[in-house]
Image (cartoon, rainbow, N blue to C red):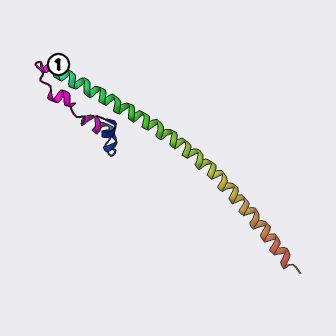
Amino acid sequence: MSKQDNASGAGMDLHAWIMNIPCAEVDANAEWSDRRIAYKMGHQHARHVAAELALDATRLLAESQAHNAKLEAQVERMRGDLKLIAESIHENEDWLRALAHNALKP
């Protein structure tokens, strides 16, 4: 199974990819005199393709986790910024109230 085949089945999960590994054309068309050798060759091919899929899944998981960590850090920074903004608004409200109160004094 090529990398393109993997990308085209983006909606499929790893289990489905592994379960739907196609037989290599060479294996499918070979005229094996020994069924045991044919089975072993097909099994070996499937193991190699499954291993590639597992590596791809591991890489994608690591990339996803790194991306999530960046997003979480960004959210924490934004929470800090929002807290500062809220405090600033609260301080400005107090200042405006005092200003209005002093302006209304005779």
* Residue positioned most to the bottom: 106
Q: Which residue is mark 1?
A: 37
Q: Is 21 contained in the magenta span?
A: yes
Residue at 33 percent across and 46 percent down: it is 11
* Residue positioned most to the left: 33
Residue at 39 percent across and 34 percent down: it is 56
**Residue 95 in which image quadrant:** bottom right
Horizontal side, residue 55 vs residue 31: left or right: right
Q: Quadrant of the C terminus?
A: bottom right
- Percent from the top left, x then y, of residue 61? 44, 37
Q: Quadrant of the N terminus?
A: top left
Amino acid tagged 1: Ile
Q: Is 76 contained in the magenta span?
A: no
Classify 31 as above or below 90.
Answer: above
* Residue positioned most to the right: 106
Q: Secondary structure at mark 1?
A: helix
**Label 1, residues with CA under 10 Å away: few <14, some 14-19, many ≥20:** few
Horizontal side, residue 88 vs residue 102: left or right: left
Horizontal side, residue 38 vs residue 6: left or right: left
Q: Which residues are magenta?
A: 15-36
**Residue 25 in which image quadrant:** top left
Residue nearest the viewer, comparing 81 with 95: 81
